[in-house]
Structure formats: C-alpha cells, structure tokens
Image: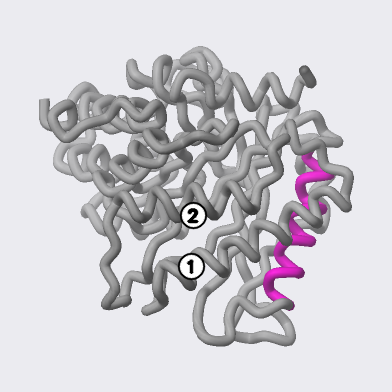
Amino acid sequence: MSELNNIVNKILENGKGILAADESTGTMTKRLDGVGVPSTPENRLLFRETLFCSSEMKNCIGGVILYDETIKQTSSKKNKIPELIESMGSCAGIKVDTGAKVLAGSPNEKITEGLDGLRDRLKEYYKLGAKFTKWRGVYNISKDFPSKLSIHSNAHALARYSALVQECNMVPIVEPEVLMDGDHSAKECFQKTSEVIKKCFEELILHKVDLKGVILKPNMILAGNKSKEKISNEEVAKLTLDCLKSSVPSEVPGIAFLSGGQSELEATENLNLINKLNKTGFIMSYSYGRALQQGALKFWSKNIKDIEGTQKVFNHRAKMNTLAAQGKWSKEIESQ
C-alpha cells in the first residue's frame, strides 16, 4: 500500500470522519456574529481548540481541515495546532484554494482559484505538519447550469491541484459541491452530480493522480432547498449510492460527504442510511463543518469559558456521526 493510501485509511478507519474547521476569517466572523461572540483571533482559536481537545476526537475524528490562520497558531498549551491534533490521534489538513470567483465566459457561475504559487504553499504546509489538503469546486443547478464550461474548468483545477498535492506527499480531498440552492428536483441533482463527478475523475486520471491516495468529498443527492418535491431519507440514500457507484472509479478508497446545508440530524440520519445500504467497496464517512459544530457553537456562545460543557455537545455529535458512518446510528441512541 502506498503511503498516501495509508493516510486515507488512517483518517477514515473504523467510522472516523473529518472535522471541517477550515472556515475563512470572513465566514467564521459571520458564525460568531450570529451567536453574539466577537470575532477575534483569540476567540476563533479558543472555540476551535475546545473542539480539538475533546475526548471523542481520538475515537471519532481522523482528520481536521484547518484554515491558513489556524495551522500557524499556537495552542494554550504552547504547542502548534497540527501537533495538538496529532496528539489527539488525528491528522491535520489544510484548505488550499483561495475561494470561488466569477467564471469568465459564464458570469453566473464560479471557478475556484488558488493554483498560482500553490506548489510553494504546499511545501510550507507540509513542513507545518499537514498530511492532507482540501480544494472545493462549486456548481449551481438551473435549466442552463452547471454549464460544460463550469464542469470542465473546475474539474481541470481540481486535477491540477491534486497532482501538485500528491507531488508534495499529501492526500488531496477533492470536493466538487453541487449546491442545494434552488428549486431543482432530486433527479436533476442526480444527473448534474453524476456529470460533475465523472468529469473530475476523467481529469484526475489525465493528470496521473493516484486515485488510491484521494478522498472524494461530494454532496448527497437532495432536492433543492426551494423545491416543492420532498423525498424520503431512504430515497436520498439510494440515489446517492446509485450516483457514486456509476461515477467513482473503484480504486478510490474513501468518500467523505459534505453536509451542505442539511441540519445536524439530517446529515447524521442520511449518512446512517447510506451505510446501511452500502454494498460498494468504498468507505462512506463524513467531512462535516456546521453539522458537527453548530450545536457546540451555540452552547459555547452562552459562556465561552464552559469548555467541558461545549466539549460534551461536540462529543455527542461526533459520536453520532461515527455510528452513522458504520450504519449503527438510531433515533433511540441519539436521544440517550
């Protein structure tokens, strides 16, 4: 087994998932403003460090995606954040794209930027202790979108990024997110997501990326958030599995779903049903941001010194998702 494949397996073994704590300063400021906490570097670090030191990190979280600010910070115990994460039995990762910008030639769509100077930034992150990286492409669904231009351009960027990351001995997380914003049906989401993922892997193969050293971070197949159509959790699971079986090469070892606007409970329940029905060779786990942190953030905002209480909320959510990643979650366990 390659070293990259070993890293993937370490991150996703035994139902472990990924904590996406890579919110940009702007996004984190919105989250903190939303709960009435001033967004200072100290407060951003305090909340994140509270999560990173939680007891269930060792059992449930195999990887933590960081933002540039956080990977360079020092914890209250005076060790570097990647060292703190490693000491909790997890791998440190880093978001390396610089955000989605307007796509020239299709102004209603986005292209993710960040390839310029990436090789040098990757070397720096590797020295800081990163074992894996993340790059997110975004696609919106409507009658005309995503366009062929958007699908091709973002797949090409994801492939170039992945090749550079593996060159630097890290695992790339490939995140092509088909957004749930809109009134589209689940069937349309299925069709567009399939097209997007297939194109991504075409480009990854063209760029000689080792697929055994990649983690795919896709959206689940859902109807748009403004759609009149309501589909059951079982249908979400079946459609998601059908989409991935037909789009993802068998060499890919692991898939870690994004939560993409689902509530904490929905993200857990859907992941659980996917794993109950999973007959593929893929590990199916989670890479959640809000769906892991939101409850803990709300609790913490009431008293930012209540570390233990905040960790208790986070531990519960992490445990529920790790059970779901093994198809062992239930509503009864959730409410215990």
Q: Is residue 295 above or below residue 144?
A: above
Task: Determine the image quadrant of residue 154.
Answer: bottom right
Q: Nearer the viewer, mark 2 or mark 1?
A: 1
Q: Is residue 305 visible?
A: no
Magenta stretch: includes residue 83: no
Q: Which residue is pictured at 77% across the width and 45% down the height?
A: 162
Q: Nearer the viewer, residue 42 or 279?
A: 279
Name the spot of residue 243 as percent of width and height, x first: 54, 54
The image quadrant that residue 192 belongs to is bottom right
Magenta span: 149-165
Name the residue located 26 percent from the left edge and 49 percent from the top edge.
37
Q: Is residue 318 left or right of residue 165?
A: left
Which label number is shown at residue 219?
A: 2
Expressed as whole percent of the image width and height from the top left, the position of residue 52 reads 41, 26
Which type of secondary structure does the marked residue at label 1 adopt? helix
Name the mark on residue 189: 1
Q: Residue at x 56, y 46 (%)?
A: 217
